[in-house]
Amino acid sequence: MKNLARGSYKCCMCNKKFNSKLPLTPSKCGRKLGVNSHKICPDCWWNKFAIEDANHKCPGCPPEHKKSKSSGTPEIIDLLSSISSS
């Protein structure tokens, strides 16, 4: 096993600094951002994040906005018809 260096991190829930060899990170955030993923301190993880019926999305990632669906067909503009022939 590798010798893991302790790191200093800032909790994305309470903004407190904490030290950890293996900081806790939401799984989707960890897969998406890798080593740059958001970290959660043990107090927030066990008392706020990992409890039943809690929202388990990463609190540090921006919320995902659904793309608006446009209705109808796109408008086609004929640029050639607007050119007057001399």
Image (cartoon, grey):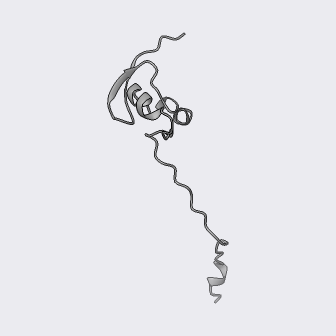
* Identity of the residue furthest to the front in this view: 52
Residue at x 46%, y 27% (from the top left corner): 24
Q: Quadrant of residue 12?
A: top left
* Identity of the residue furthest to the bottom in this view: 86
Q: Is residue 85 above or below residue 72?
A: below
Residue at x 62%, y 83% (from the top left corner): 82
Provide residue 57's location: percent of width, then percent of height: 50, 40
Between residues 45 and 1, which one lies in front from this camera angle?
A: 45
In this orientation, does residue 40 appear? no
Between residues 28 and 34, which one lies in front from this camera angle?
A: 28
- Please give left or right for residue 44 compared with residue 1 in the image: left
Q: Quadrant of residue 80?
A: bottom right
Image quadrant where one finds the C terminus: bottom right
Q: Is residue 68 above or below residue 44?
A: below
Between residues 24 and 55, which one lies in front from this camera angle?
A: 55
Between residues 45 and 7, which one lies in front from this camera angle?
A: 45
Image quadrant where one finds the N terminus: top right
- Please give left or right for residue 9 compared with residue 50 in the image: left
Q: Quadrant of residue 70?
A: bottom right
Residue at x 43%, y 18% (from the top left corner): 21
Residue at x 48%, y 48% (from the top left corner): 63
- Please give left or right for residue 42 compared with residue 27 in the image: left
